[in-house]
């Protein structure tokens, strides 16, 4: 293991997460969003959101050189550097904290993505990419190796405040997983034979459809389903680079 310069680490992250392939379909500005400071990366912090709390925690408590997040600061169009947005950017620049964002790339990655990691935690077999977004799969599908009910599945994933739409009348076998705002994918989940869709947040418009079509949905929370990939990516990086790793928790309860 060895210390890593920022530009070398960013190149490795971009390639591993296949950032370039998402340029035309993700409104997030994936990759290095703020920084480019030419220094060794000795400490990396991870957080779901690039909030002011997370940024300040990374600087003053974690003493990080790089903050990696799922939800960054730039989404689809130029944003005026004013108000709270200005404060976040200025805090990053003044303290030379680099900010890296991976949105859809961290949903879709089959080694460390949110969905692939949840599938691994559940010990699913025959796991494959699924659930297309503008032609690119961002979720996964797989089958259980042992019989589990929806509550046992939630316990394995350690969801703290899940919502259960428990309408499947038989045993759960095939499971679709789409982190975050994936409730709309329940119709595709039904089409490909899933008994259960695991996602972040529910949609009122899907409740009756799930009830009538006899498919279950486990909603673990947008925030909680999008922690998995960051934790897994951290575990991969620490195996290859001599860096300190930390995770910043700022749950929204949503």
Image (spheres, rainbow, N blue to C red):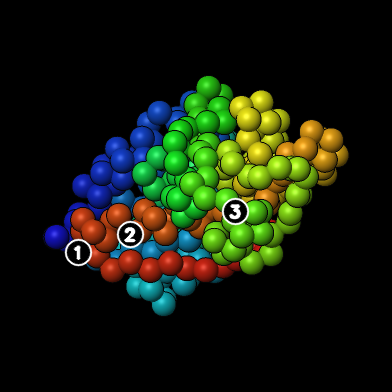
Of circles 2 and 3, which is in front?
A: 3
Disc 2: which residue? 235
Residue 88, image x and y in percent?
Answer: 52, 60
Q: Residue at coordinates 64% horizontally, 50% vertically from top-left?
A: 200
The C terminus - image quarter? bottom right
11 displayed left or right of 45: left
Q: Is residue 68 above or below residue 145?
A: below
Using a 10 Å C-alpha cutoff, classify the residue at mark 1 as few (fewer than 14 neighbours), some (14 to 19) or many (20 or more). Answer: some
Disc 1: which residue? 242
Q: Earlier in the sequence, mark 2 or mark 3?
A: 3
Depth order, front residue of 250/66: 250
Using a 10 Å C-alpha cutoff, classify the residue at mark 3 as few (fewer than 14 neighbours), some (14 to 19) or many (20 or more). Answer: some
Q: Work out whether residue 128 can be spotted.
A: yes
Residue 185, image x and y in percent?
Answer: 66, 34
Residue 42, image x and y in percent?
Answer: 24, 66
Disc 3: which residue? 148
Q: Earlier in the sequence, mark 3 or mark 1?
A: 3
Q: Quadrant of residue 14?
A: top left
Say what secondary structure mark 1 lies in. Answer: loop
Q: CA distance from mark 3 to mark 1?
A: 39 Å
């Amino acid at each position: 293991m060895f210390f890593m310069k920022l530009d070398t680490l960013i190149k490795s992250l971009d390639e591993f997460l296949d950032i370039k392939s998402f340029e035309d379909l993700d409104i997030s500005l994936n990759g290095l969003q703020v920084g480019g400071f030419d220094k060794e990366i000795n400490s990396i912090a991870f957080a779901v959101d690039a909030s002011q709390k997370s940024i300040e925690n990374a600087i003053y408590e974690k003493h990080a050189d790089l903050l990696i997040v799922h939800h960054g600061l730039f989404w689809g169009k130029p944003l005026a550097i004013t108000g709270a947005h200005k404060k976040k950017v200025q805090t990053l620049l003044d303290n030379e904290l680099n900010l890296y964002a991976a949105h859809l790339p961290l949903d879709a990655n089959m080694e460390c993505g949110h969905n692939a990691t949840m599938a691994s935690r559940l010990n699913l077999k025959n796991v494959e990419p699924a659930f297309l977004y503008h032609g690119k799969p961002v979720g996964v599908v797989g089958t259980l190796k042992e019989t589990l009910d929806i509550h046992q599945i939630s316990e394995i994933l350690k969801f703290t405040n899940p919502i259960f739409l428990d309408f499947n009348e038989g045993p759960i076998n095939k499971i679709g997983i789409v982190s975050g705002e994936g409730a709309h994918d329940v119709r595709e989940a039904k089409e490909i034979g899933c008994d259960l869709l695991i996602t972040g947040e529910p949609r009122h418009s899907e409740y009756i459809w799930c009830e009538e079509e006899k498919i279950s949905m486990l909603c673990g929370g947008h925030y909680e389903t999008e922690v998995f990939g960051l934790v897994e990516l951290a575990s991969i990086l620490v195996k290859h680079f001599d860096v300190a790793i930390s995770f910043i928790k700022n749950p929204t309860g949503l």
